[in-house]
Amino acid sequence: MDHEADAYRTDLMTITRFVLNEQSKYPESRGDFTILLSNIVLGCKFVCSAVNKAGLAKLIGLAGETNIQAEQKKLDVLSNDVFVKALVSSGRTSVLVSEEDEEATLVESSKRGKYCVVFDPLDGSSNIDCGVSIGTIFGIYTMSHNDEPTTEDVLKPGHEMVAAGYCMYGSSCMLVLSTGTGVNGFTLDPSLGEFILTHPDIKIPKKGNIYSVNEGNAQNWDGPTTKYVEKCKFPKDGSPAKSLRYVGSMVADVHRTLLYGGIFLYPADKKSPNGKLRVLYEVFPMSFLMEQAGGQAFTGKKRALDLVPEKIHERSPIFLGSYEDVEEIKALYAADE
Ligand code: AFP
């Protein structure tokens, strides 16, 4: 391969080119989604740069404030600020829900647009101080009316999302996106400052050999989850035992599951009957991506994307990943009923 020529390729598929190509399939489209996405991409680049510089910039440490979830770290505050400003100034949003803000942001009338964005600006923040991969997760809905926006505009099932994605700040910075026609992965080329299509049409393997769960909660699990994890470790059908991998940062755990296959679980337990993860900006976007990649996402009761949240920070148990692995846990819950 001619590496020198490769370094100067001029036909690279940047994320903007990619979305413009997608949009050209809809002649009525006016470029609103491209503008919205370019502001999300800007937020991701900003946070990526801040995460990389965190130690140097003395950003690590508590911001001296508390948020609704727990303690809020400086990078969380900064990331939230970056995304809220980018999304409002895009002029394409009406309602924003952030993990960091107790109330939804209803955008002022002069800056309103047709989209609602739900997001966790910096998920996995307990991992910041030890340099483990963290990420931003987002989901996008369209407004279904032209009246005053309200919180109700985002209390919709996940299957109504028009797009979802995450950006992982890891050994490389990767943005994984679905606009409802498959899943594509883009890697940030720092020399260009552009996300380049590196993982086209991601499909999750039908079955995997990794399970991913916080086993420290095992004493409080319900029967089906306990049985499933037991099966992973001590299979009785002659198949090899699965490997356990758990980062504790949803973006990293889901990213590995998407690429290598397997299952990610954050089940309900006696202490947290609704699990830990948030429906709107963790469960829905990741479930949307999993289904688009050929996998499944299940709550223990139903398809995750069919949940209808009643509150913006609602939680749900979640089992997502390879189609056949999720089938197994579904069967255990069905038998339990
Ligand atoms: P933090 O943002 O507090 O680190 O929480 C991250 C998270 O919401 C999600 O990214 C992980 O999958 C999950 O929590 C890990 O939770 P446990 O620490 O209870 O396993």
Image (cartoon, helix red, strand yellow):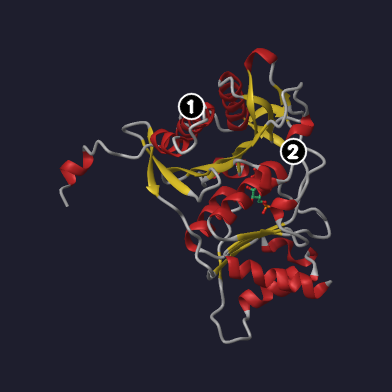
Q: Residue 44 location, x and y as percent?
A: 50, 33
At 50% across and 65% down in the image, what residue appears?
205
User: Image check: 35 left or right of 232?
Assistant: left
Quick one: label 1, few (<14), some, or many (20+) residues within 10 Å? few
Q: Amino acid at mark 1?
A: Ala
- Which residue is nearer to you in this view: 186 or 141? 141
Is residue 50 depicted above or below 133 in this figure? above
Mark 2 C-beta closer than 8 Å to ligand 1: yes
Labels in figure, total: 2
Is residue 138 depicted above or below 269 in this figure? above
Classify residue 337 by image quadrant: bottom right
State the SS at label 2: loop
At 69% across and 46% down in the image, what residue appears?
158
At 75% across and 24% down in the image, what residue appears?
149
State the separation of the CA atoms marked 1 and 2: 25 Å
User: Image check: 186 left or right of 237?
Assistant: left
Q: Residue 251 location, x and y as percent?
A: 56, 48
**Label 1 sits on residue:** 57
Quick one: label 2, few (<14), some, or many (20+) residues within 10 Å? few
Q: Residue 166 location, x and y as percent?
A: 54, 43
Disc sitting over residue 69 in the figure: 2
Q: Residue 162 location, x and y as percent?
A: 60, 40
User: Image check: 46 left or right of 126?
Assistant: left
Is residue 233 depicted above or below 146 in this figure? below
Contact, mark 1 vs mark 2 (Cβ under 8 Å): no
Q: Is residue 249 visible?
A: no
